Amino acid sequence: MRKLAIILLSFTLICLFNYKNIIFATEPLDLTDIDIIQRQVDLFYTDSEKSMISDSITKEYLEKISSAISQIKSNLEDINNDKINEIIFDLKNAERLFSIRSLVRSLFDQSGFVLDNANLLEAHLAVSTAKEEYPDFCKKELDEIIKAEGQKKEIEEKTKILNTLFTDESRQNVLDNITRENYNEVLNSINVMTVTPYKEKFLNDISIAEKIILEKERIQAEADAKAREEAEIALKKVMEAEPKYLIKVSKRTHIMSIYSRDESGNHTILKAEYKVATGRTPGLTPVGTFTLGTKQLWHEWWSGGSASPYTTSYANGLYIHGPIYRSKNFNTVFPTSVSEIGFNKTSGCIRTSVEAAKFVYDNCVQGTTIEITN
């Protein structure tokens, strides 16, 4: 009767196994038959050599199979010890590989990123114990460890870079001499991180530095604007206080050039050019830098009441003036005094057209610089 009961029970379990022959059955298997347990243990592996375990193994099911084997050994006296020992050997190997895999998987979070407390050394040692027996399995797990090491290394490198902006480990105190360039370099480095959780955390940390940068830039912009305003005011005062024009006379070309100030206050803008006559001998019109002096609407010369309009002195007894007239009348001009403009014909003065002399008279105040060159 006892043997008959065992036979009937075995038949029932085999039927159940054929109906639900995967590890995660919708209904629990009755694990009281050695053959069923053997088939279940076989499902822990993905290859006939039993060197690679399935991704579907769970700790709970391993414990369930182990418990079932213990029950069979204690309850049945006529079991095949060799067969049960083979099952136990396969189960222990599955448990060993599962333990290694679990240890490697514990290096990562659910999204596949290395954890802060990941014990890489322990994982390496665990894999090394099975490397010779299960090379393919260990290679796969070692690749995962290498992945974790790469992520750890990236985190360490980026942490060092990020910390260059701060004076403390809590990253609450930003460097006093932080610049936009420093900030951008660190930001660009963090933006290319592959470890997303740390990337997000570091970007949050760096936002503190960004606020400091923006505030410093705002203060600097205000200071620059104030400095520009003060410079403009100072330049305006200079331009109002100092002569507006600079006069240059070339004795070689007989050209008088008049320059006005640019935005920086320098005399670089050519306002006008006029032909002039200079001294009939080289020494009569002096070379050098002089300043304009007194002005006269008409300056009388030494003979017969002749005069020149719009005269401005620039040296002792020397003037910039218009043509010579017989009297203070624009209808009495000496024609030669006009035709001689452009040549060495004066006693040292700078004779020019009425238009040019009037421009200097009207616009070039006393103190205006005149530079005379050969």
Image: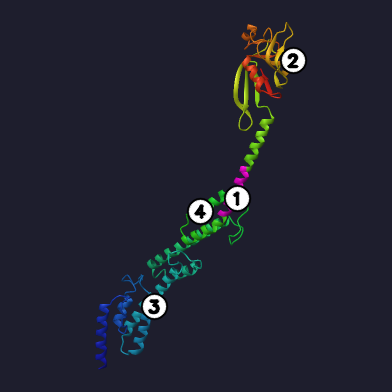
Q: Is mark 3 on a helix, strand or loop?
A: helix
Question: Disc 3 designates what residue?
Answer: 60
Q: Residue 189 carries which label?
A: 4
> What distance separates the C-alpha of mark 3 from that of mark 4?
44 Å
Q: Residues within 10 Å of mark 3 (few under 14, many from 20)?
A: few
Q: In this view, does 322 lie above or below 119?
A: above
Q: Do the residues labelled 2 and 3 touch (CB within 8 Å)?
A: no
Colouring mode (rainbow / by chain / secondary structure / one colour) = rainbow
The answer to which of marks 2 and 3 sits earlier in the sequence is: 3
Q: What element carries label 4?
A: helix
From the viewer's perspective, is 318 left or right of 68? right
* Residue closer to the observer: 125 or 111: 111
**Image quadrant where one finds the C terminus:** top right
Residue 253 seen from this side: no
Identity of the amino acid at label 3? Answer: Glu
* Residue closer to the observer: 218 or 304: 304
The answer to which of marks 1 and 4 sits earlier in the sequence is: 4
Q: Which mark is residue 216?
A: 1
> What distance separates the C-alpha of mark 1 from that of mark 4?
22 Å
Identity of the amino acid at label 4? Answer: Ser
**From the viewer's perspective, is the residue at label 1 or at label 4 nearer?**
1
From the viewer's perspective, is 172 left or right of 135? right
Residue 306 seen from this side: yes
Q: Quadrant of residue 299?
A: top right
Which residues are the magenta region?
Answer: 210-225
Q: What element carries label 1?
A: helix
Q: In this view, does 123 lie above or below 236?
A: below
The answer to which of marks 3 and 1 sits earlier in the sequence is: 3
The answer to which of marks 2 and 1 sits earlier in the sequence is: 1
**From the viewer's perspective, is the residue at label 2 or at label 4 nearer?**
2
